[in-house]
Image (cartoon, coloured by chain):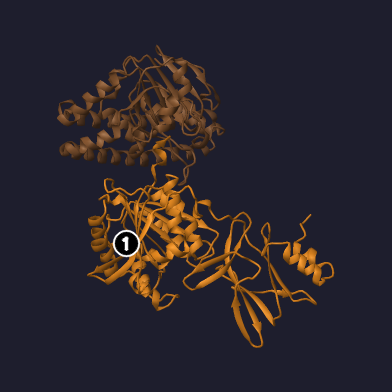
Amino acid sequence: MTPPATSAVVLLGAQRFDPTLGTSVKELGVTGRIALITAGWQEREPEDEELVADLGVPTVNLRLHARGEMVFRDDPELREAHRQRQAALRYRQDVYRIRLEHLLEADRVISLREAPPDVAEEQAQASLASIRDLDAWHLELCAKLRSEYEARWDLPSRPVLARHREEITEAVAVCDAVAISGGHVATLVNRLVLFGIGPLLRGKTVFAWSGGAMALSDRVVLFHDSPPQGPGASEVLDAGLGVVPNVVVLPEPERRLRIDDRDRVQRLARRFAPASCLAFPARSRVTLRDGVLGNGHGVKLLKTDGAVVPFHGRRTR
Amino acid sequence: MKHRLAIDAFLAETVTPGRLRAFLESRRFPIVEGASVTFVWRGEADAVHLRHWIYGLESSNDLHRAPGTDLWHLTMEIPSGSRVEYKYEVHRGGGSTWIEDPLNPNRARDPFGANSVLQGSGYEAPSWSRHDRLSRQGHVEPFVFDSDALGRRSGHLYLPARFRRTRQYPLLVVHDGSDYLAYASLRTVLDNLIHRLEIPDMIVAFTDSPDRLREYANDERHARYLTKELVPHLASRFPLFDRPQARCVMGASFGAVAALSTAYRYPGFWGRVLLQSGSFAFTDIGKRNRRGPLFDRVVEFVNEYRAEPKAVSERVFVSCGVYESLIYENRSMVPLLDGTGMDVRFVESRDGHNWENWRDRLREGLSWLMPGPLMFIYE
């Protein structure tokens, strides 16, 4: 998928308790209408009053979640096809997770073995390669399922969906910018793809935070180092829109990442290299313009040697 | 230098009424000093015994009377993180009564009454087991169901806050449901874990049995009632996912036997099984078991399972307290379950056969069996 050429993309940390979006909008000089995508909030999608107040410019909420419900209500055949595809994706995610957990456990056990340094390094590389291969294979499988689904059901030709896409296209056309909130990242990605949002971002300034920022990357990675059910294993969910390539977006590091654990940081960074693993604490942001990620504030780069350092910028291609 | 225990320091000097009063008013009881725990009771008696529920230790231990006082005390070594339920057995005039510890406000309740609770060094009741004003409360309503297999059944249904008919939900079926609600705070636990995104919004059927020792001990009718009657009935009333991964059956003690035997009779139907302190009695030779006739049908079932273990679910969570006599049986079950290819997790705790132990393991068990959207939501 070729990412659309946007005017600028601003990725931000969580906005829930300490919003900085309004400031970023002002800094980029956006004064025109902004299209809001809050589909990640699911049923709470319309509850955007605080967001609108923080932005301080005219807005229109594209209501992608509600539109999705309407499409599935009015096009039962597509609803059933969607349900089957989601079940297939969920099954594969479950199986991928089983494989992944065993590979990670094997990696842990092997790393505890006494071995000559060259053997230990060779085996660590082999473990890493297995995990990377599995991630890549899973991502390819998801892409295959999605493309088969889209080809079979020819989404643009379905009248109900086409009508909503047309309305959305018209609404975005008169906006200067698009703002994409976080929330349930799988729901968000699904809605963005269903309504063909990627191409509509061309020429727009895009603001995205938390799950919204993850959805703009080319690979959505779910992560939590301390979930209640035991040691957390980061897992690849699916492709994102690819607007911000070669970056793994890691929001809410304050409660999700043990960035003081050098070993975990190293494993995560090496697993997804050469993509940059970027942690976005509250109030952080970075801007992509002309293929360069820069103007970083508070964003942290997880390095392959386990260090965590401030991220100032890099080329994304 | 070994730390001098508070009771020893107190008794090293003359015990006056004023000193005794000050001692009792200035401390929490039992006195926990690292692994040393001192039980204290005050009153006139011929003898006082500590009656606790730690399997492997003498169940009755004498408290010693401090000379010239009515103060009784006993110091024991209790590992950190332990929870121990106990009572005092007070002997007077040839008789005896079991009483709760008047100096200790901590109680654990069950259908038979209440026990005092020792919270060992480092133990804390989990925050998610207490009411959280930020957590939206689910709705609990009674249900009555006329079962072909077992006759009229009753229980309670839990619907999550923000329940919507347009959504689909996983189903959790709980044995001894009223007891889980009353003594293991399961309603509060569900509210909190859902609020924290650690488990999904779910519908929960709290089932009860008027004759649990019979019906829970591998009774075909009970398994049929849950699987062939109750679940279809609930599916006709509520939007439930129709897949094994979204169906969990759970229970404690005999309720765990009921949960496993139900899954065993309908392999593949219940994709998630949660077993707490299961009464998985078995014999290696013959059929006679040391626990008595109530367990005969359990032994029959567990022996059959041990002879030919098979995968009956996808994931099984097993927990047991190390102070329970059932720890041996539960430890014995785990490799059998694991060897079938099921995904099995076993958790031990320094606790006994009681509702608070089962409460304290709910977060780990439920969130592992049915993870919530925590990994998916980035606000």
Work out whether residue B55 or residue A123 is closer to the camera in this orientation and state it. Answer: B55
Location of residue B273 in the rendering, given as x and y in whole percent from the top left corner: 36, 56
Q: Can residue A67 be seen in this view?
A: yes
Work out whether residue B86 or residue B180 is closer to the camera in this orientation and state it. Answer: B180
Q: In the rendered image of this protein, does residue A100 appear above or below residue B242?
A: above
**Furthest-right residue in this view:** B14
Location of residue A66 in the rendering, given as x and y in whole percent from the top left corner: 28, 35
In the rendered image, which quarter contains the N terminus of chain B?
bottom right
Q: For numbered disc 1, what is the local secondary structure?
A: loop
Mark 1 surroundings within 10 Å by alpha-carbon count, few (fewer than 14), some (14 through 19), many (20 or more): few
Q: In the rendered image of this protein, does residue A63 appear above or below residue A169?
A: below
Location of residue B113 in the rendering, given as x and y in whole percent from the top left corner: 51, 73
Residue drawn 42% across and 30% down? A51
Q: In the rendered image of this protein, does residue B288 appear above or below residue A305?
A: below
Q: Colour of chain B?
A: orange
Q: Mark 1 points at which residue?
A: B308
Residue drawn 40% across and 26% down? A213
Chain letter for the residue marked with disc 1 in the picture: B
Q: In this view, does B174 lie to the left or right of B360?
A: left
Q: Give the image quarter of residue A55.
A: top left
In the rendered image, which quarter contains the C terminus of chain B?
top left
Location of residue A219 in the rendering, given as x and y in whole percent from the top left corner: 36, 27
Work out whether residue B270 or residue B177 is closer to the camera in this orientation and state it. Answer: B177
**Furthest-bottom residue in this view:** B94
Q: What residue type is labelled 1?
A: Glu
Residue drawn 33% across and 51% down? B314
Q: Chain A is drawn in which colour?
A: brown
